[in-house]
């Protein structure tokens, strides 16, 4: 069950990995703001499609129940992000602050990446 949750978190995190790039924070090729709402929504849709393909690839390796849970979590995340995208695009343009708000929602949905207690985790004595 834990691996299913980790796989779902990984799939959701992949879904939202492009949000910083859309906010123009990763060097060349970053988006410039304000951006037309249609272009922002197109970027988000393309990113979600790619993330769904990745999640489906992982789901084929899981049991039927695990795959169903992964898909449900992924779809719930997409709904929340799309609601924020719609709110950001309501006036026809998306500002850098609005894109950051979308990124913040995505970050909250991603959750932890399971790094605690790993090989390099410092133990308190």
Image (cartoon, rainbow, N blue to C red):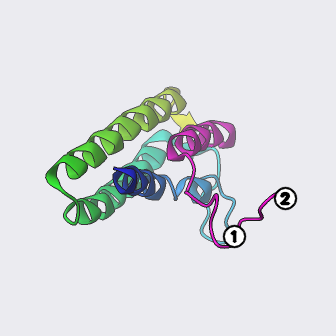
Q: Nearer the viewer, residue 63 or 49?
A: 63
Residue 40 location, x and y as percent?
48, 47
Residues at marks 2 and 1, CA–CA distance in whole angstroms? 41 Å
The correct choice, above or below, for 73 with respect to 119 in the image is above
The correct choice, above or below, for 106 with respect to 19 in the image is above
Quadrant position of residue 114? bottom right
Specify few, some or many for label 2: CA neighbours under 10 Å numbering under 14, 14-19, or 20 or more: few
Q: Nearer the viewer, residue 54 or 100?
A: 54
Residue 72 location, x and y as percent?
28, 39
Residue 101 location, x and y as percent?
62, 36
Tags 2 and 1 touching, CB below 8 Å: no
Q: Nearer the viewer, residue 86 or 61?
A: 61
Residue where numbered disc 1 is placed: 27
Specify few, some or many for label 1: CA neighbours under 10 Å numbering under 14, 14-19, or 20 or more: few
Magenta segment: 95-124
Of the numbered discs 2 and 1, the one sitting upstream in the chain is: 1
Q: Residue at x 31, y 58 (%)?
A: 55
- Is residue 85 found inside the magenta-colored segment of the image? no
Residue where numbered disc 2 is placed: 125
Q: Is residue 54 left or right of residue 33?
A: left
Q: Residue at x 33, y 50 (%)?
A: 1
Quadrant placement of the C terminus: bottom right
Q: Secondary structure at mark 2?
A: loop
Q: Is residue 48 left or right of residue 68?
A: right
């Amino acid at each position: 069950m834990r691996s299913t949750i980790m796989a779902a978190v990984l799939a959701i995190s992949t879904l939202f990995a492009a949000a910083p790039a859309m906010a123009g924070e990763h060097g060349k090729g970053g988006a410039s703001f304000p951006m037309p709402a249609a272009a922002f929504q197109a970027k988000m849709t393309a990113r979600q499609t790619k993330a769904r393909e990745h999640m489906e690839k992982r789901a084929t390796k899981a049991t039927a129940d695990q795959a169903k849970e992964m898909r449900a979590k992924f779809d719930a995340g997409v709904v929340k992000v799309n609601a924020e995208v719609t709110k950001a695009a309501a006036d026809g343009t998306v500002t850098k602050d609005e894109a950051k708000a979308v990124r913040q929602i995505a970050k909250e949905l991603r959750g932890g990446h399971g790094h605690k207690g790993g090989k390099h985790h410092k133990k308190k004595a």
